[in-house]
C-alpha cells in the first residue's frame, strides 16, 4: 500500500508545479537497497525498500536550490548512501551533549541543520516507525509507519496546509499543521534520555 500513497503524493507535487526531477532521483533496485543497507549493519524493512525503489533521494546538481528539492516543506529526501553516511556520523561520540543516536536509526529526510525524520529499522521487518528527530527537543513525535507518514503529507497538501508563499518558498501553515499532525502521530512520544543540544 505504501507505493500507492507515494505515487499519490508524487502526483500532488506535480499538480503544485514542483520540479519532481529535482526532488527525486531514479529509484534503486531491491538488490541494491538490501546490499547497501546490510553492508552497513541495517536490516531493511519492506517499507524502506519501497521508499528507495520509488526514489533515491534528491538531486544535488549544481545550481539547484534547497527549495527546489524539498519533498515536504523544509525537508528533502536523502539519497540512501548519504542517509547511511549521516547515521554513522551521528553515532560517533561528540564533545558536547547531544541526544543519543540508536544503532537502528536511519535519517530519510533532512533540513540540513539540526532536524530530520528518521526511520527505526531495529523493530519490524515489514514497517518502519518514523521519528521526528530534533537535537533541541527531548520528546519527539512518532508516526507508526512510513505509509502513515505519507498519508499525513497527502492530507497536508489536500487541506492547503502546505503552500507557496509570495516569495516562491514552499511553506506550511503551522497552526493548521500542528492540529492535523496530532491526528496522525502516535499518542506515545519518543523520549530521549540524553541532554539537549544547547543553542
Image (cartoon, rainbow, N blue to C red):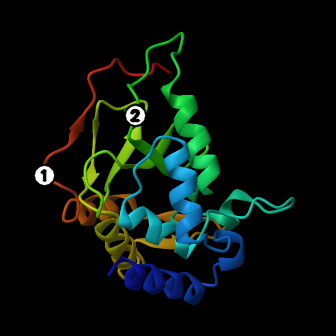
Front one among 43 and 196: 43
Judged from the image, the secondary structure of the residue bearing numbered disc 2 is loop
Judged from the image, the secondary structure of the residue bearing numbered disc 1 is loop
**Residue at the disc numbered 1:** 187
Q: Residues within 10 Å of mark 2 (few under 14, many from 20)?
A: some
Counting from the top left corner in percent of width and height, residue 99 is at: 38, 25
Counting from the top left corner in percent of width and height, residue 34 is at: 50, 59
Front one among 40 and 155: 40
The answer to whether residue 84 shows anywhere in this view is yes
Q: In this rendering, is residue 168 above or below 130?
A: below
Q: Residue at x 41, y 80 (%)?
A: 3
Q: Residue at x 30, y 58 (%)?
A: 125
Q: In this rendering, is residue 103 above or below 154?
A: above
Q: Earlier in the sequence, mark 1 or mark 2?
A: 2
Counting from the top left corner in percent of width and height, residue 58 is at: 66, 63
Q: Residue furthest right?
A: 62
Gap between marks 1 and 2, in whole Å?
24 Å
Q: Residue at x 36, y 47 (%)?
A: 132
Q: Residue furthest top?
A: 95
Q: Which-is-in-front pick, marks 1 and 2?
A: 2
Q: Residues within 10 Å of mark 1 (few under 14, many from 20)?
A: few
The mark found on residue 103 in the picture is 2
Front one among 124 and 71: 124
The mark found on residue 116 in the picture is none
Query: Which of the image's four quarters has the N terminus?
Result: bottom left
The reply, left or right, for residue 109 in relation to residue 155 is right
Amino acid at each position: 500500500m505504501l507505493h500507492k500513497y507515494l505515487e499519490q503524493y508524487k502526483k500532488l507535487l506535480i499538480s503544485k508545479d514542483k520540479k519532481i526531477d529535482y526532488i527525486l532521483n531514479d529509484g534503486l533496485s531491491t538488490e541494491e537497497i538490501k546490499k547497501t543497507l546490510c553492508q552497513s549493519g541495517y536490516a531493511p524493512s519492506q517499507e524502506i525498500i519501497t521508499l528507495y525503489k520509488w526514489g533515491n533521494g534528491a538531486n544535488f546538481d549544481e545550481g539547484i536550490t534547497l527549495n527546489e528539492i524539498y519533498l515536504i516543506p523544509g525537508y528533502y529526501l536523502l539519497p540512501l548512501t548519504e542517509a547511511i553516511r549521516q547515521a554513522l556520523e551521528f553515532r560517533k561520540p561528540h564533545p558536547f551533549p547531544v541526544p543519543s543516536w540508536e544503532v537502528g536509526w536511519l535519517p530519510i529526510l533532512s533540513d540540513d541543520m539540526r532536524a530530520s525524520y528518521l526511520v527505526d529499522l531495529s523493530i519490524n521487518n515489514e514497517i518502519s516507525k518514523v521519528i521526528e528527530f530534533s537535537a533541541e527537543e527531548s520528546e519527539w513525535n512518532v508516526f507508526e509507519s512510513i505509509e502513515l507518514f505519507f498519508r499525513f503529507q497527502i492530507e497536508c497538501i489536500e487541506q492547503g496546509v502546505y503552500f507557496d508563499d509570495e516569495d516562491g518558498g514552499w511553506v506550511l501553515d503551522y497552526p493548521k499543521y500542528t492540529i492535523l499532525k496530532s491526528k496522525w502521530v502516535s499518542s506515545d512520544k519518543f523520549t530521549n534520555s540524553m541532554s539537549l543540544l544547547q543553542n
